[in-house]
């Protein structure tokens, strides 16, 4: 069944979000706007509006939401989570939308690349490489950071490009392997059940 | 009480002065602590966007390592604190998840029992050391400086994860004990903008600028933060954030404040590494 209607709306999008543990709340959103009124990002940049993002997701504007840079500029201050009268954790819903965007393999903006780099780096050294993270995130826009980098350099604060690996990095990679194997198996089982 | 010190990525690199000062304070306080070279990144609540199970496994592994040594975890990064507490809560609330994580850990020879306590350095000072002991170690009071606490988000919110209702404004007490004047600062529980510094620098710096402007409005000479990430935004990026060209606001890490009042030298506290000069304090 193709959930997309002629307007390109995907009415099942919110269900996809709700499948993620952090996104369960989306089915109960009243769109009251308390999240937006308490949002510390919106206070300085009203292009970001959590209520609007969640409402667009509920309406089925799947591609618009998933490709939007806006879903990546929640600063995770958790103010909305504290104040939501329905207790549905709007900030966590944004995280669930990010979950879906990453599953879709989006790499088109800074926010999504910032997110992807964390796991990559942890699998390499066990920690986040703070020297490479800005490069990976900003790509050629890294040049905007040159004055800041010079300042940090003279303070002796530039993070090392080749940091030491943690003791037991192999264990981290092994844990990841175990998890990925399990996910594959779960997906296969789900497939089988779908067929029978 | 025995601790495993968890500095977080920033404490080890960009804001190494906060780690240096914290270690110094732990030594002066006579705390039994150790750094563990096997600790990994906590995932910062960012890894979970791509792979929640992996973030949980990373944290469970760190917890198991600390338990193996019979130590509680103490951190100077708010985001590490929140991420670890969140993982711990997820594992405590879901027996199946707990079992599954332990099955994985068994493969690398570890077990997470659920006994390790996770604390912020600030909470350790408050609950395990106590104000009295800290006060007894103060040698030179910092006078005539108006200081505002800047807590940062992840040591306060979300309340169901942090669940710390013991003393909401302990930093103000520490400021007072050190001889400075605690300022009632409107942004003390607000966000510095750090987490979107790379995703949207303009917006992030506007948030930082708001905090700095309000520091002036509330007549604070300095800010004190317990968080290495707030330290990056407020100190390292203050020059870029300060578009209105307001006078600079020096930012101290909590350990640096205590260290100064305990008579530890500026050098040992890494004050030369703070981007905004703290010179006015060195010869106070």
Image (cartoon, rainbow, N blue to C red):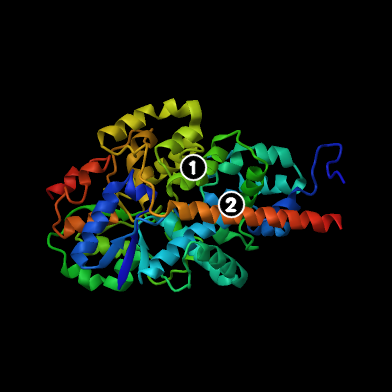
The x and y percentages for residue A161 are 37, 36
| Disc 1: host chain | B
Q: Quadrant of the C terminus of chain A?
A: bottom right
Front residue of this view, candidates B103 and A12: B103
| Disc 2: host chain | B
Image height of A159 relative to B155, above or below: above
Residue A80, located in which quarter of the rendered image?
bottom right
Q: Residues within 10 Å of mark 1 (few under 14, many from 20)?
A: many
Judging by the rendered image, the residue that carries numbered circle 1 is B196
- Judged by depth in the image, the label closer to the viewer, 1 or 2, is 2
The x and y percentages for residue B6 are 36, 58
The x and y percentages for residue A77 are 50, 52
Q: Separation of disc 1 and disc 2 at Cα?
A: 20 Å
| Residue B110 as seen in the image, left or right of residue A3 | left
Give the mark, 1 or 2, whose residue is nearer the N terminus: 2
Judging by the rendered image, the residue that carries numbered circle 2 is B51
Front residue of this view, candidates A137 and B262: A137
Residue at position x 52%, y 63% in the image: B107
Residue at position x 84%, y 45% in the image: A3
Residue at position x 61%, y 52% in the image: A180
Front residue of this view, candidates A3 and A57: A3
């Amino acid at each position: 069944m193709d959930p997309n209607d002629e307007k390109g709306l995907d009415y099942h999008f919110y269900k996809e979000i709700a499948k993620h543990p952090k996104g369960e709340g989306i089915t109960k959103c009243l769109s009251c706007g308390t999240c937006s009124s308490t949002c510390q990002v919106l206070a300085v940049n009203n292009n970001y509006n959590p209520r609007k993002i969640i409402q667009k997701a509920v309406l089925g504007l799947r591609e618009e939401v998933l490709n939007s840079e806006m879903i990546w500029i929640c600063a995770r201050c958790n103010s909305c989570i504290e104040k939501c009268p329905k207790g549905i954790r709007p900030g966590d819903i944004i995280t669930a939308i990010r979950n879906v965007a990453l599953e879709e393999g989006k790499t088109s903006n800074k926010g999504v690349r910032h997110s992807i780099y964390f796991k990559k780096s942890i699998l390499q050294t066990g920690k986040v490489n703070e020297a490479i993270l800005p490069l990976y995130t900003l790509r050629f826009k890294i040049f905007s950071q040159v004055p800041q980098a010079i300042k940090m350099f003279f303070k002796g604060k530039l993070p090392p490009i080749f940091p030491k690996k943690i003791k037991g990095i192999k264990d981290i990679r092994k844990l990841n392997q175990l998890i990925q194997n399990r996910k594959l198996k779960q997906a296969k089982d789900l497939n089988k059940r779908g067929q029978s | 009480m025995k601790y495993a010190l968890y500095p977080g990525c920033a404490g080890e690199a960009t804001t190494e002065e906060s780690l240096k000062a914290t270690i110094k304070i732990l030594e002066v306080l006579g705390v039994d602590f150790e750094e563990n070279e096997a600790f990994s990144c906590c995932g910062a609540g960012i890894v979970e966007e791509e792979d929640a199970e992996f973030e949980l496994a990373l944290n469970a592994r760190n917890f198991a390592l600390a338990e193996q040594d019979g130590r509680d975890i103490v951190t100077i990064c708010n985001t590490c604190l929140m991420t670890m507490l969140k993982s711990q809560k997820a594992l405590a609330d879901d027996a199946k998840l707990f079992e599954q994580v332990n099955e994985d850990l068994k493969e690398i020879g570890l077990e997470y029992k659920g006994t390790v306590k996770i604390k912020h350095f600030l909470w350790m000072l408050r609950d395990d050391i106590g104000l009295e002991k800290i006060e007894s170690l103060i040698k030179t009071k910092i006078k005539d400086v108006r200081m505002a606490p800047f807590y940062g988000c992840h040591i306060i919110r979300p309340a169901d994860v942090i669940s710390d209702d013991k003393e909401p404004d302990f930093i103000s007490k520490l400021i007072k004990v050190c001889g400075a004047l605690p300022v009632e600062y409107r942004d003390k529980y607000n966000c510095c903008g750090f987490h979107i510094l790379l995703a949207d620098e303009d917006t992030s710096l506007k948030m930082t600028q708001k905090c700095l402007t309000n520091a002036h409005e509330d007549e604070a000479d300095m800010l004190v933060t317990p968080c290495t990430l707030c330290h990056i935004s407020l100190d390292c990026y203050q020059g870029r954030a300060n578009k209105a060209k307001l006078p600079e606001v020096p930012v101290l890490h909590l350990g640096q404040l205590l260290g100064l009042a305990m008579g530890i030298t500026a050098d040992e506290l890494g004050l030369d590494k703070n981007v905004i000069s703290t010179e006015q304090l060195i010869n106070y």
